[in-house]
Image (cartoon, helix red, strand yellow):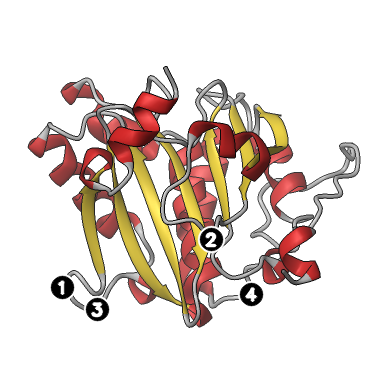
Amino acid sequence: MSASRMTPPELRVQGPSPTEDTSKVAATDKNPATRRTLHQNILGKLRPLPLQYHWTFWYDKHSDAETASSSDYDERLYMLYEDVSDIATFYRVYNNYPWDKIPQRDTVHIFRKGVKPVWEDPENLRGGCWRFRVPKRKAQAFFHEIAILCISSEFQAALEKEHDHVLGVSTSVRFNTHLISVWNKLGSNERSIKLLEETILNRLSPNLRPTDSSPNSYFYKRHNEHDGYQEAIEGSK
């Protein structure tokens, strides 16, 4: 096993700066001005108030095994930053993380505080994910926008009437793409799933939207449709 597999990239976060400008686009997101409106609108609303929910950054090391037991997560999954409660803290974490050094098949999650990014967490048991295969050249910009839409409760607002919840987002490095996921709580609610899809596609910047709707581009999958789901649930009891 290579050294990069054993030592995932570390997070180094400095304390808050009294002059920090929370309206800036993330330093790692060097993309055209087509996304400025999205960030300005959302960040402008967020600046005076804390986030509706608190969020946690997690790191998930890939396991070579086809399925992983719950006990494996104690070694594979660890917390990068526990409590993101406002947009300034989000950017202190996001801008200081070495995104380009994540080993292939490892994953970074941003989840509601108190919810683990695993199927067997009580909040995830009956849920699922929208998953997007994003080319590497667009992956970081795509994940940045998805993360902002998530933590600002833009996705949550779309699902409020369905009594569903968006619990987190993930980015997983693949060979020539990233697999970026948006997790929701109610995998059985078809209307909620469709509303979430529409919101993601409508709110993303035009140049980041998938160019087709085939499963090679994006798809929805319930957690209980995965191989190993039942084993993971039983192992957590």
| Camera-side mark, 4 or 2 | 2
The amino acid sitting under disc 1 is Ser
The disc placed on residue 100 is none
The answer to whether the residues at label 1 and label 2 have Cβ atoms under 8 Å apart is: no
Task: Tell me residue 108's x, y (percent).
Answer: 59, 51
- Secondary structure under tag 2 reads loop
The disc placed on residue 30 is: 4
Q: Which residue is mark 3?
A: 211
Q: CA distance from mark 2 to mark 3?
A: 32 Å
Which one is earlier in the sequence, the residue at label 4 or at label 2? Answer: 4
Q: Earlier in the sequence, mark 2 or mark 3?
A: 2
Residue 141 visible, this orientation: yes
Measure the C-alpha gap from mark 3 to mark 1: 9 Å
Q: Between tags 1 and 2, which lies in front?
A: 2
Tell me the tag on residue 214.
Answer: 1
Q: Mark 3: which amino acid?
A: Thr
Do labels 4 and 2 touch, CB within 8 Å? Answer: no
